[in-house]
Image: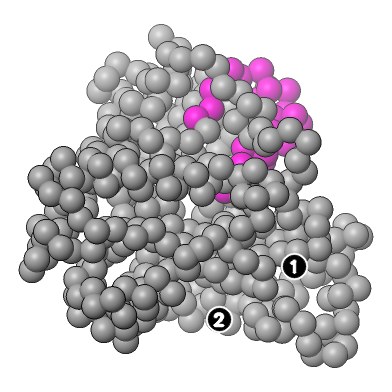
Amino acid sequence: MARVGVLLLNLGGPERIEDVGPFLYNLFSDPEIIRLPTPALQKPLAWLISTLRSGKSKEAYRSIGGGSPLRRITEQQARELQSRLRQQGVDATSYVAMRYWHPFTESAVGDIKADGVEEVVVLPLYPHFSISTSGSSFRELQRLRQADPAFRRLPIRCIRSWYDHPGYINAMAGLIAREIGNCEAPDSAHIFFSAHGVPKSYVEEAGDPYQKEIEACAALVMERLEQLLGHPNPSTLAYQSRVGPVEWLKPYTEDALRELGEQGVQELVVVPISFVSEHIETLEEIDIEYREIATEAGISHFRRVPALDTDATFIQGLADLVHEAMAGPEVNLDMAAQLPKKVKLYPQDKWAWGWNNSSEVWNGRLAMVGFSAFLLELLTGHGPLHALGLL
């Protein structure tokens, strides 16, 4: 039996307050985040923005205990998955590849080669494909593969997305059903799906399938939930983490919460649909910021379904995905990262941009920030970077 390396892709996050600045520097040093006309300016600009931005980001991380739990949870998921696969007869070793913080993708690839792995299954911990999350991680693997003959020789099978996989749907529905069981009026409790947003142009101009996959996933979860509960519940899907001057996917979470409050909704069960681990978006943005908005809107009972983390049904679902990838047709990195034909990666090539202000999940890509515009902001004190508190 071949030795299989299961490579789990995630974004990464600062584990300590002192990691926030370096994490942001890594983020902004990536030309896919900010594309400048002169590459030599990339690192100086990354240093400047990360220095100016780190204060607000540190405040957010202090509110959840001083750092991101993402690495700890992801590594625990990797251990659980490895154990499950070995119990099922697969000679598997799991590896964690973070995009912007430790353990970096390059480090994971080095471990795979050192361990003598004979084939690799790439499993992004993003259920829904987006050009800015799993797509970016696939492209990073492509770059490493092209530069490393030993890595290039390894057979690779990729899982592009798995938003409709039964293991994921069942795990989500099970956690929601458990939370509804704690409600005062389970039959009428309102299910509120909050997905991470992306700029609307990603979907309309770049053909990003993210929105369609999110909507289909929410429908599948509600269908399974009704089977578990024996009754339907009202539901809403909204998008969080919007920042910047461009339009993002709607409805926005904060607006949808206020609207439900105006409608007299009293019991809300919030579901972080696009997140499989607790992190800054669930622990700070949902649990603190959105809870406050809901309370002010008159929603008296705000319940939040926990992230999947190491839920047994979820881990088995991941194991099933690995089995299916190994048995099914090959999906290589080029196929996994493929975008619609004749579409350039947006918004890198346009003078528009959007980003998430929470510092851990940057589910939007900043595009083409002109250095001349940046200098103008420094001189005048006006512009979008100032508006976001970055300068």
Q: Is residue 141 magenta?
A: yes
Residue 201, position in %: x, y? 66, 56
Q: Nearer the viewer, residue 168 or 115?
A: 168
Tell which of 312 and 300 is nearer to you.
300
Q: Amino acid at mark 2?
A: Lys
> Which amino acid lies under the numbered mark 1 shown in the image of this protein?
Ala
Q: Position of residue 161 (x, y in %)?
A: 48, 36
Task: Locate the C terminus by quadrant.
Answer: bottom right
Magenta highlight on residue 174: no
Q: Residue at x 18, y 51 (%)?
A: 232
> Looking at the image, which residue is at 75% across and 40% down?
343
Mark 1 = which residue?
Answer: 46
Asked if residue 110 shows in the view, the reply is no
Residue at 88% over, 57% down:
39
Looking at the rendered structure, the secondary structure element under dot 1 is helix
Work out which residue is located at the far bottom of the displayed protein and give it: 380
Read off the magenta span. Answer: 133-159
Badge 2 marks a residue whose secondary structure is helix
Q: Closer to the camera, 41 or 182?
A: 182
Along the horizontal axis of the image, is 132 left or right of 194? right
Callout 1 environment at 10 Å: few (<14), some (14 to 19), or many (20+)? many
The answer to whether any part of residue 229 appears in the image is: yes
Tag 1–tag 2 contact (CB < 8 Å): no
In percent of the image, x 35 and y 48: which residue is there? 218
The answer to whether 15 appears left or right of 130 in the picture is left
| Of the pair 35 and 110, the residue shown nearer to us | 35
Classify 288 as above or below 349: below
Vertical order, 116 against 265 (above or below): above
- Residue 56 - label: 2
Q: Is residue 122 above or below residue 177?
A: above
For the N terminus, give its image quadrant: top left
